[in-house]
Image (spheres, rainbow, N blue to C red):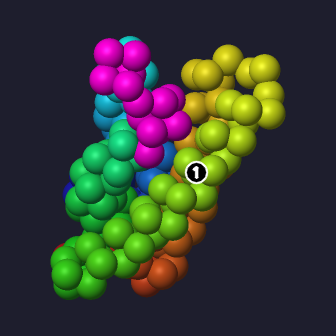
Amino acid sequence: MERQVAQRVVPRGTIRRFSIFGGFNTLLFWILWEILVFISPLIGISNTFAWALGWTISSISAHFVHRYFTFDGRKDVRHTTIGALSVYAFGLVGSTLTFDSLLILSDLPIRLIFFINVCCWGIFTWGMMKWMVFGYSDIEESE
């Protein structure tokens, strides 16, 4: 019964549900990024490399979080893993380019750049995961 209520309030596959569980993924990404930015002078990496490394590590976790909580397990995990890695790889390249461009071309604080970039690329990721990776529709979840 509780599952049906949750499904009505925050249906699977919606941007609302993606945002809720994506918040966990973003928190993980942000913590990794902050640690990497903090130690970057010690290990000799740039803030952009810290972005790319944080994105890569958190993307692995994100696939399984979204598979279980945002969408569902209707499709084989091998299929969704390959699709998700493709989406996250494209997002890695695109988001790294926009992060670096914003760092170079703007005087915005680095954390604001992080936030803007995560929001923009999060919308792209949701759409790609929903329609291409999970092939999700609004059909009721089978029990």
Q: Picture quarter containing residue 37?
A: top left
**SS class, disc 1:** helix
What residue do we see at 45% from left, 52% from top? 17
Magenta stretch holds residue 44:
yes
Q: Position of residue 85 (x, y in %)?
A: 35, 69
Tell me the chief SS of the magenta region.
Answer: helix
**Could you say where residue 81 lies in the image, as x and y percent from the top left?**
26, 73
- Name the residue located 36 percent from the left edge and 43 percent from the top edge: 53
Residue 126 seen by the camera: no
- Residue 96 percent location from the top left of the image: 56, 48
Q: Residue at x 63, y 50 (%)?
A: 97
Side of 26 relative to 113 (left or right): left
Count of numbered tags:
1
Question: Which quarter of the rendered picture does the C terminus lie within?
Answer: bottom left
Which residues are drawn in magenta? 39-52
| Left or right: residue 22 compared with residue 117 | left
Q: Nearer the viewer, residue 45 or 126?
A: 45
Q: Nearer the viewer, residue 125 or 48?
A: 48
Vertical arrangement, residue 41 with respect to residue 25, above or below: above
Q: Residue at x 43, y 83 (%)?
A: 135
The residue sitting at the front extreme is 44
Q: Which residue is mark 1?
A: 95
The amino acid pointed to by label 1 is Ser
